[in-house]
Amino acid sequence: MKVAANAMDAIDSLTPYFVHLVVLYVSLVFIYLLYKYRSSDGDAPNLPPGRKGLPYIGETLDYVLASRWGTPEKFITDRTTKYSPDVFRTSLLGEDMAIFCGAAGNKFLFSGQNKYVTSWWPDSIKKALMDPDSVENSSKEESTKLRAYLPPFLKPESLQHYIPVMDTMAKEHLNQHWFPFDEVQVFPLSKKYTFALACRLFMSVTDPDEIENFAKPFALATAGLISVPIDLPGTTFNRAVKAGRQIRQQLLALIRKKKNEILEKRKTVASDLVDSMLMDGMTEVEIGNKIVGFFIASHDTTSTAITFLVSYLSDHPDVYNRVLQEQMEVIRWKEGRSRETLRWEDIQRMKYTWCVACEVMRLAPPANGSFREAITDFTYAGFTIPKGWKAFWTVHTTNKNPKYFPDPERFDPSRFEGDGPAPYTFVPFGGGPRMCPGKEYARLEILTFIHNLLTSYKWVKINPNEKISYIPSPIPEEGLPIKIQAILN
């Protein structure tokens, strides 16, 4: 027993040293991995200047915090000042990334599509909203198929037929959700309108309860689009993944129902976008993925543009009066032709109103930018971008850059009159082969809604100093509450 006790004493005496050795070993391994992480590009001395930040997380938290504080451009300008005004490196969403800056950077990425870069979606977007078995991170084939399909639906000759529907729905929405009240919140109501319109045009869904069943999980899913993809209970990303799964299930049920209706009724004329895709032979999963993409492009960004257009018009009475005058002239023009609803030619007369909308989107951009992936090694501004690296263009390198927009914080719609800004300096819808195909759809939706709002109501902001956060689009933290008063025509 004495021998055993002595042995145990010896082991106890060695235990602290053993623990210290384990801690030392783990620490050395961590330091080594961190060193490897920071020096893994040592063989490529011409990489853009910049920093990776923390392992895996990179500088994602810096970007998110700058956005939450309402200054997403600060993340960009701090780094262009410190590293390079042309391109700098960072690590976002777990990926090595090159941020292309300025008009030249925009032009290079837009014109280099499928030559140097291709489309890429972060894991957070793919896992939250797309079917994980049908969409790859980099999918040139998916992008090509999507764009090959979009033009018939979004060509001006097709969109002309939707203007009366947009006009009627805008009137109904205002009468139901604005007119009965003295105070309203613009942001949630604009989202309600744009979502209902998308449901009507894309899927022929008009029942308010059915629309709400789609809207609730969609809001949760989009909240996690640009987040660190850590799928743990309670995280924004986890909630987004669960909501995305629910959306896909609801969409597949609707698509199958419409597919059966086409077969049973032998329909040959499509009544909406889903019908068109079914008749073109697309699979149910493909259609679900496309519809989700259409909702992101047509709903979230457009409702943001409408919200801030209302806000800026309230702040600038002179601009408000000129826009109102233009819209009243449209009414007189329309009534002179004995028409009740707006038509294509009416929208074309809203030139100044669209200049105002563009200036709003410059100062409060509905979308930050878009991602790409390098499909080959290439050189830009003297720096090497390796194959597999991700690239990002963002409106925050140009929109408030005094090089392109003198006195950039000043609200001045005249910047967009005449020839407007220089090419590639104002790109709210992207550019090149990857320009947002819904640009014209968004223009019609924004102008139709503002026409009906301006000619029916006048308003004033309740809190002129309301804080704005970017999550990832700009969001008024109180929903932009306003006092409204109907205009008696």
Image: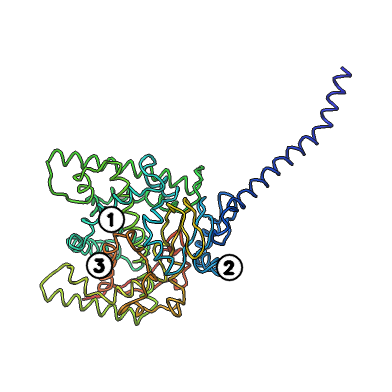
The quadrant where residue 436 appears:
bottom left
Considering every residue shown, the one lying at the far top of the view is: 1
The tag earlier along the polypeptide, 2 or 1, is 2
Q: Quadrant of the N terminus?
A: top right
Q: Earlier in the sequence, mark 3 or mark 1?
A: 1
State the SS at label 3.
helix
Which mark sits nearer the N-terminus, 2 or 3?
A: 2
In this rendering, would 193 be left or right of 39?
left
**Amino acid identity at mark 1:** Ala
Q: Residue 386: where, in percent of width, then height?
A: 49, 54
Expressed as whole percent of the image width and height from the top left, the position of residue 291 reads: 30, 49
Residue 349 locus on image (x, y percent):
21, 75
Residue 49's label in the rendered image is: none
Q: Is residue 243 above or below residue 15?
A: below
> What residue lies at 30% left-to-right and 80% top-to-bottom?
418
| Image mark count | 3
Amino acid at the residue labelled 2: Lys
The residue pinned by badge 2 equals 82
The secondary structure type at the circle numbered 2 is helix
Query: Going by the image, does 84 lie left or right of 453?
Result: right
Q: CA distance from mark 2 to mark 3?
A: 44 Å
Under circle 1, the secondary element is helix
Measured along the vertical axis of the image, is residue 138 above or below residue 74? above
Q: Provide the residue designation for mark 3.
A: 448
Tell me the kind of residue under disc 3.
Answer: Thr
Q: Is residue 127 above or below residue 461?
A: above
Residue located beneath label 1 in the image = 196
The residue positioned farthest toward the right in the image shown: 2
Q: Residues within 10 Å of mark 2 (few under 14, many from 20)?
A: few
Asked if residue 143 lies left or right of residue 468, the reply is left
